[in-house]
């Protein structure tokens, strides 16, 4: 029974990762996950304005690869 609950939680976290494939990172710290690339870019631009010297990037959650680095 406990294993079934653990398996269900694992599926839910995977479904969330698929439903939100982009994440914003500030100096490698995660700021948030987004379903739409435009929303992720908007959040990244705001983060760059708040932290102008930080490295702000949008990454693909599935592969961990950089999608875009935000610059002012």
Image (cartoon, helix red, strand yellow):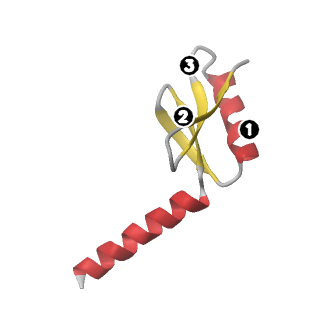
Q: Is residue 29 above or below residue 13?
A: above
Q: What's the distance in space between the residues labelled 2 and 1, CA to CA? A: 13 Å
- For this orientation, the residue located farthest to the bottom is 1
Quadrant (top left/top right/bottom left/bottom right) for the N terminus: bottom left
Image quadrant in which you'd find residue 42: top right
Disc 1 target residue = 42
Q: Residue at x 30, y 81 (%)?
A: 4
Q: Crowdedness of circle 3 by 10 Å Cα count: few (<14), some, many (20+)?
A: some
| Secondary structure type for disc 2 | strand
In the rendered image, residue 23, in percent from the top left (x then y), is placed at: 57, 43
Image quadrant in which you'd find residue 66: top right
- For this orientation, the residue located farthest to the top is 53
Residue 25 numbered tag: 2
Quadrant (top left/top right/bottom left/bottom right) for the C terminus: top right
Q: Is residue 71 above or below residue 17?
A: above
Q: Residue at x 54, y 37 (%)?
A: 65
N-terminal of the pair, mark 2 or mark 1, is 2
Q: What's the distance in space between the residues labelled 2 and 3, CA to CA? A: 10 Å
| Secondary structure type for disc 3 | loop
Residue 9 numbered tag: none
Determine whether, in the image, residue 15 is placed left or right of residue 72.
left
Image quadrant in which you'd find residue 7: bottom left
Comparing 53 with 16, the one in front is: 16
| Secondary structure type for disc 1 | helix
In the rendered image, residue 28, in percent from the top left (x then y), is placed at: 47, 30
Disc 3 target residue = 54
């Amino acid at each position: 029974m406990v294993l079934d609950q653990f398996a269900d939680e694992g599926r839910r976290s995977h479904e969330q990762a698929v439903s939100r494939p982009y994440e914003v990172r500030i100096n490698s710290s995660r700021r948030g996950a987004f379903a739409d690339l435009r929303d992720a870019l908007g959040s990244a631009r705001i983060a760059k304005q708040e932290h102008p010297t930080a490295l702000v990037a949008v990454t693909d959650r599935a592969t961990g690869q950089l999608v875009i680095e935000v610059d002012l």
